[in-house]
Image (tube, rainbow, N blue to C red):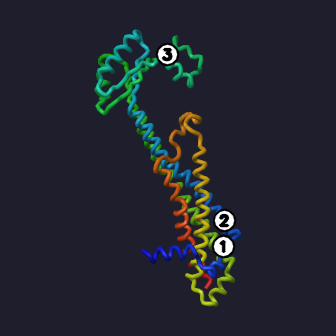
Amino acid sequence: MLRQVRRFFAFLAGDPQADRAVPPTGFTASLTLFTAGAMAFLAVFALALALATGRMAEQWGDQLARTATLRLPALEEVEARTATALRILDQTPGVAEARALTTEENQALLEPWLGPDLPLGSLPVPQLIEVTLDGEDFDAAGLRARLEGELPGAVLDDHTRWRAPLFEAASRLRALGLLSLLLIAASTGAMITLAAQAALAANAQVIRVLRLVGARDIYIARAFVRRFTLRAAWGAAGGTIAGVVAVLLLPSADTAGGFLTGLGFQGAGWLAPVLIPPLAAIMAFAATRAAALRMLRTQS
């Protein structure tokens, strides 16, 4: 373990003689920094999407699971039928509260679809009753059977058919976020590999001189690996910070009408972006080492 720690610090410190084979500035340096930063910025949003979709689906699913809606057809004696429905719901285990929506609330529900000047008094608008549940002992099938006997035409919606598509959509969005992370990682590795190969080709003369004085390929490759690994780490750190700031600047639930509720990182999820720079460095290490050794073999 101690030997590995020493090798790690020796890798960070580098070798001044070997570092001369790697250009400290130039096209390859800028390309590596920009690629790592841009991909880390995108990775932050991919992580936010992957983590937030599951959390949002769980929140919305819990809200739907705690509520139900009873719809009474627009028939005669609506008030009496509403009172009967409220009495049945009050006697039903698992129902915490039942409340009939007012005319103004029905108007607000229909306004986005039919406009603000809707004459509800002249239309057969069904009576809606909002039901709040308080436990798992709620028996939707039993309640439907009782309603069918006492209030023919009443329709109970326990939101079951809404929850399944919601969770399915959330799982697909989560998979899309993870796929985006894989594509970002692959693109980053490919660009760093191309940058390392370009640097090796541009410094072929320096590499020949190093070989003439007895330098081994692994010694030369280590200099390229160190320089490109550190470049990728610094670029990814900058991109991660910019991505986190952008996530913090996303509109809140109030200004977004509730659609972006929970979008971003929460709790331990804030530790996920911290892993991006180390992972970018590890990926750059592996990609550069493989590219450097392969190029050095072809140049020998």
Q: In the image, what residue occupies the spot 55% across and 63% down?
A: 280
Residue 26, x across and y down, in percent: 71, 70
Residue positioned most to the right: 26
Marked residue nearer the N-terminal end (2 or 3): 2
Quadrant of the rendered image containing residue 150: top left
Where is 275 relative to 170, above or below? below
Marked residue nearer the N-terminal end (3 or 1): 3
Regarding mark 1 in the picture, which secondary structure is present there?
A: helix
Marked residue nearer the N-terminal end (1 or 2): 2
Residue 124, x across and y down, in percent: 48, 14
Crowding at dot 1, Cα within 10 Å, few <14 / some 14-19 / many 20+, comes out as some
Distance from disc 2 to disc 3, alpha carbons, whole Å, reads: 63 Å
Regarding mark 2 in the picture, which secondary structure is present there?
A: helix
Residue 153, x across and y down, in percent: 37, 19
Task: Pick whichever, 292 or 134, lies toward us.
Answer: 134
Distance from disc 3 to disc 1, alpha carbons, whole Å, reads: 72 Å
User: What residue would you read off at disc 1?
Assistant: 198
Q: Amino acid at mark 3?
A: Thr
User: What residue would you read off at disc 3?
Assistant: 103
Where is 78 relative to 199, above or below? above
Residue positioned most to the bottom: 213
Q: Amino acid at mark 2?
A: Leu
Crowding at dot 2, Cα within 10 Å, few <14 / some 14-19 / many 20+, comes out as some
Indicate left or right for 273 with 198 as reference: left
Regarding mark 3 in the picture, which secondary structure is present there?
A: helix
Work out which quarter of the rendered image holds the C terminus and state it.
Answer: bottom right
The reply to whether the C-beta atoms of the residues labelled 1 and 2 are less than 8 Å apart is yes
Work out which quarter of the rendered image holds the N terminus and state it.
Answer: bottom left
Residue 240, x across and y down, in percent: 58, 56
The reply to whether the C-beta atoms of the residues labelled 2 and 3 are less than 8 Å apart is no
User: What residue would you read off at disc 2?
Assistant: 31
